[in-house]
Image (spheres, grey):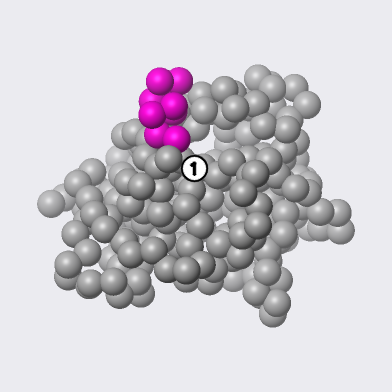
Amino acid sequence: MSPDSPTAIPTGAHGQDRAALRRELLARRERLEDRDTKDAALSAALLRKLIALRPACLGAYCATRGEFNPLPILAQLARALPGVRFALPVVDARARRMRFVPWMPGDAMQAGAYGIDEPAHAAATAEPDTLLVPCVGFVEAGLRLGYGGGYYDRYLAGRSEVYTIGLAYAACELDDLRAEPHDQLLDLILTETGAHGLDADAADTQG
């Protein structure tokens, strides 16, 4: 199987050892070939979905460790949806909590927890109605594997009204992943090759 094969990775080699799965998935993501083409396809699918959703406030993220970067399409989205607002996460590593703060393209940034960029002016708090979620891995049903910190799961607990879109590369699909009590299912997961998750059929028809 090539490093960027869309075939789901079998979990048999690691069982449900999430740490081992993360290591394999991160290595596969770093080895992805033809990333520009994959990014263009995923960007186009994401932009179509967001225009159809018409969010009032979109929560995004600053990409790290080979994640898909959603920020370049936000200027296009702002032109298509005048008045849309954006927000980015700010992490309190000591409290192990994450909140979102207002942000617009061009705003000042600074290094935050784990070396990930975040808005420099983070006094106000935003409440996104639509949230982009980076995925280390995922399964067809919409279950996401993250880095293990639990920040997104804790943030989404009790926020069932937020529409969640996971972003990943097809090479990072798993054939199975056992849900843990804290795991939050995503409404939709988009890759460069298609849609997955609870709302996948709707995304496919809109594309």
At 70% across and 77% down in the image, what residue appears?
Answer: 95
For residue 117, side relative to residue 192 (left or right): right
Q: Position of residue 8 (x, y in %)?
A: 22, 50
In this picture, is 91 found above or below 62? below
Quarter holding residue 40:
top left
The residue lying furthest to the bottom in this view is 94
Whether residue 99 is visible to the viewer of this picture, yes or no, is yes
At 33% across and 51% down in the image, what residue appears?
Answer: 139
Q: Position of residue 189 (x, y in %)?
A: 43, 42
In this picture, is 131 found above or below 110? above
Q: Which residue is mark 1?
A: 187
- Residue toward you, 32 or 151: 151
At 23% across and 43% down in the image, what residue appears?
Answer: 6
The type of residue carrying mark 1 is Asp
Q: Quadrant of the C terminus?
A: top left
For residue 102, side relative to residue 196 (left or right): right
At 63% across and 40% down in the image, what residue appears?
Answer: 130
Whether residue 116 is visible to the viewer of this picture, yes or no, is no
Q: Position of residue 157 (x, y in %)?
A: 61, 60
In this picture, is 119 found above or below 163? below
How many C-alpha atoms fall within 10 Å of the one at disc 1: few (<14), some, or many (≥20)?
some
Main structural element of the magenta stretch: helix, strand or loop?
helix
Residue 108 belongs to the span the image colors magenta:
no
For residue 134, side relative to residue 98 (left or right): left
Judged from the image, the secondary structure of the residue bearing numbered disc 1 is loop
- In magenta, the rendered stretch is 199-207
Q: Position of residue 122 (x, y in %)?
A: 81, 58
The residue lying furthest to the right in this view is 123
